[in-house]
Amino acid sequence: MYDFEFERPRSIADAVKALKTEEAIAFSGGQTLMPTMKQRLAMPSKVVSLTAIEEMRGVRQDGSGIWIGGATTHATVARETKDSYPALSSLAARIGDPAVRARGTIGGSVANNDPSACYPAGVLASRGVIVTDRREIPADDFFEGMFMTALEEGEIVTAVKVEVPETAHYAKFIQPASRFPLTAVFVAKYGDGVRVAVTGASESGVFRWTEAEDALSGDWSADAVDGLSAPDGSDMISDLHGTGDYRAHLVKVMTKRAVAAC
Amino acid sequence: MNRIELKVNGKTVSGEVEGRTLLVDFLRQTLRLTGTHVGCDTSQCGACTIHMNGMPVKSCSVLAAEADGAEVTTIEGMANADGSLNTMQQAFQDFHGLQCGFCTPGMVMAATALLRENPKPSEGEIRHYLEGNICRCTGYHNIVKAIQAASGQDVTPVAAE
């Protein structure tokens, strides 16, 4: 790899300071960033690791929801939310492979907003709020498009908060080589409505399939999805693994499976 | 340069590393612990799997500077105190869980991490856990058997063909 400066601050305040340098990048596990840097698709001159910041780690009950520190690994989330939010635990337990889950973090995943990442779907469906060093951003406003978020220059995701639904399920159609979803759907049913978040499908990254939300809020059953037409395939990712129309079809199938599994 | 101090296989070691130094390069080139292999260098293959603070990690995708203060175990730290193979290593030999041996250090480290989490994994659980470790020789079958045997479970004897 090319050389760069490395810093590993112990507090959020120090990390914010370290990130003020031009071309500095926040590093929160590096399971995406390191391969990206090896290929020089990203070439920051300074890497600021967030993994030693104690106040950004852990999972705790937060009123009726759950607070997850930004630097909490997928393995920890999988273990710590097993009882409090099994669907989120199951999502975390299926990211990548065990070694990736031991390093990758929820803050890194949402900040990167890969159009095929698992967490954006889970966080968006769970009425998530992204907590940063300077504000709180509802997930609805946070995920802006493929690899794009509402984060400003040097802003750090310090935590993610989610509301625990009555029932939920993450249906992931896995791309076996990368273990990313080819398309995956997180369905969450709350007392006052249903959320359906889709990842791996759209050219604009994670999105809510509102037609399905409306149908399922009126009739909570897998059959309720039958009457819907799949989202428009022309806005979907088309690559060697599947066409846009194929992914659009998968959105419907995986939504149905997610509801049936609840 | 970053000064790091960590424990590797129970011994405290320290050194100066560049930001870009990968943990696997620190282990192999600085400490000369060449049992950890680099297969793909893109975090696909798992040959470089080691334990960091008790968790399996791909050491080609961890910066050495990130390991400051960590406890690291590599394949060199796996044998029994008298130098004989430990249960997992012996099972890989007994059940012919390797052919060329290139992936084996990573496989043993991943398998050991699995049994720590799940002492009696089913065949399906073993295969799922090994998703991040690629073997191009064995077809995984004997690796799975070795891990089942190392966990004290019955393994159907391999039929001679």
Image: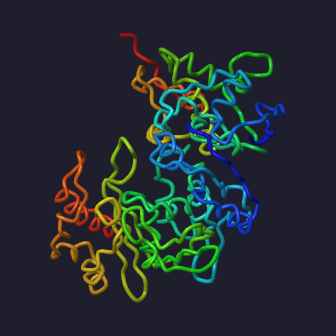
Tell me if I can see residue B76 in this picture: yes
Identify the image quadrant of residue A183. bottom left
Q: Position of residue A115 (x, y in %)?
A: 37, 60
Q: Quadrant of the C terminus of chain A?
A: bottom left
Identify the image quadrant of residue B87. top right
Q: Quadrant of the N terminus of chain A?
A: top right
**In the displayed structure image, the side of residue A47 where residue B70 appears, left or right:** right
**In this picture, is A116 found above or below A145?**
above
Please tell me which residue lies in front, A66 or B1. Answer: B1
Residue at image coords 47%, 15%: B99
Residue at image coords 48%, 15%: B100
Tell me if I can see residue A262 in this picture: no
Q: Position of residue A11 (x, y in %)?
A: 75, 65
Residue at image coords 54%, 45%: A34
**In this picture, is A130 found above or below A56?**
below
Please tell me which residue lies in front, A140 or A135. Answer: A135
**In this picture, is B146 found above or below A144?**
above
**In this picture, is A240 found above or below A129?**
above
